[in-house]
Structure formats: structure tokens, C-alpha cells
Amino acid sequence: MTSGCALLMLASGGALAQGVFTCVDSKGRKITSDRPIAECMDRTQQEISPTSGAVRRVIQPQLTAAERTAAEEKEKAAAEARAQAAEEKKRERALLQRYPNKPAHDRERAVALVQVEEAMKTAARRVQELTEQRKAINADMEFYSKDPGRAPPSLRRRVDENEMSIASQKRVIADQESEKKRVNARFDEELARLRPLWAASSVPAAAAAAKY
């Protein structure tokens, strides 16, 4: 349908309410119709008011299957990024509520480290006790120093159990040393996140105080 014919038809009778669709096709021809134009589905079309000539809307080109897939993947990635950002904001609010200032954070770090230190001290005391026990066992083994294989099974068992117990407590101490590093690393990471949050939260408070 030509441009002139389309406009004449749309200007008559009940067609006045309908829009005029127009585009330039792949061959450079301007096409006008009373409905979306099939030849221009791969390019932008405009719907124009037949009375005022104003653009009612712009119809974007239809996407190919590959373009639709790419657009869907892009939107999915954007949605995931928005969800991650919202979740991060939620975690920041919870962190700030738990630690409103540095003294509060320092107190909880100290409490966590005290628990680790107590476990290490308990294990160290046990190692000391076992070491004293080993001295008594060694005194009993002295009689068999020339031939330890002649020592009674019960005495050899005491030696083995003492060695295993000392090794076990030393592992506890080593594990607690690792736990101490982990606790400090966790609180250091939190502190790095909290500093800008504390600074940001103090700005509105300072501004409000300046008004009075």
C-alpha cells in the first residue's frame, strides 16, 4: 500500500483512531501501512497519529533467535548482579546492626580470642601433666634400659598411651593456633568492611547535630 493511499484510507470513517505505521525497508523504500509492516520487522518502525502526525510509539526490530538468546543471557546476568547487590546490602545492614562501632567489634574479637586461648592453655596444662607422668614412666623403664623389650606389656602400653596423649594435645594446640589466625583474619576482614559503613553512617548523624 502506498503512503498516499494509506493516509487517505486512515483519514476516512472509523479509521481515524488507528495509527499509521511507517518505516524504511532494506532497499531504502519508505513504506506506510495501517498495521505493523512485515518487511520492516528487522528494523525500527514508527506508529504515527493520523490526525496530528505525532509519533505515538517506536516499535523496535524483532530479534533473531541468537539475538534473543544473547538478550536473555544479558538480562539474566543483570538480574543476578542486582540480586547479589541487594544481598550484599542486606549483609552490610546486618553487620552494622551487630557492630554499630569499633569498640563493639573489638569486644567480640576479644571474646572469641579468649575462648581460643583458654583451649590452648588447657591443652598446654595437659601436656605438662603428661610430661610429668612420662618422667615416672621413664623411671620405671630405667630397670629395662639395657633391654626395653623385656619391659612388661602394661609398662610398654603406658609408654605408648603417654606418647599418643602428648601428640594429641599438641595437635589441639596447633589447631587452636590455626583457629586464632582464622578468628583474627575474620575480624580483620569485617573491620575493613565496617570502616566505610561506620563513616557513612556517621555523616547523617553529624549533619543532624550541626543543625542544633
Image (tube, grey):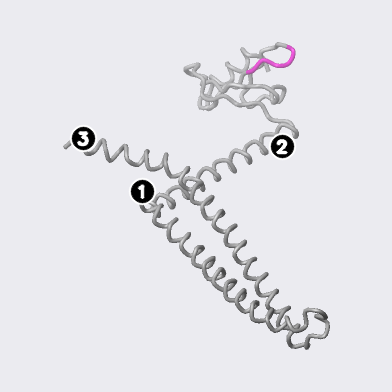
Q: Residue at x 71, y 37 (%)?
A: 69
* Cα–Cα gap, marks 1 and 2: 47 Å
Q: Mark 1 or 2 closer to N-term? A: 2
Q: Residue at x 65, y 36 (%)?
A: 74
The magenta-colored residue range is 23-27
Q: Mark 1 or 3 closer to N-term? A: 1
Q: Residue at x 66, y 38 (%)?
A: 72
Q: Amino acid at mark 2?
A: Thr
* Residue nearest the observer in this picture, 128 or 146: 146
Disc 3 target residue: 210
Relative to 125, is 61 above or below? Answer: above
Q: Mark 1: few, some, or many residues within 10 Å (few <14, many ≥20)?
A: some
Residue 142 placement, left or right of 189: right
Q: Main secondary structure of the magenta part?
A: loop
* Cα–Cα gap, marks 1 and 3: 21 Å
- Judged from the image, the secondary structure of the residue bearing numbered disc 1 is loop
The spot of residue 124 in percent (x, y) is 56, 68
Disc 1 target residue: 101
Q: Mark 3 or 2 closer to N-term? A: 2
Q: Mark 3: few, some, or many residues within 10 Å (few <14, many ≥20)?
A: few
Residue 87 placement, left or right of 80: left
Image quadrant assignment for residue 178 = bottom right
Image quadrant assignment for residue 23 = top right
Relative to 148, is 122 above or below? Answer: above
Relative to 36, is 94 above or below? Answer: below
* Residue nearest the observer in this picture, 164 or 101: 164
Q: Are marks 1 and 2 in contact (CB under 8 Å)?
A: no
Disc 2 target residue: 69
The spot of residue 136 in percent (x, y) is 64, 81
* Residue nearest the observer in this picture, 13 or 15: 15
- Judged from the image, the secondary structure of the residue bearing numbered disc 2 is helix
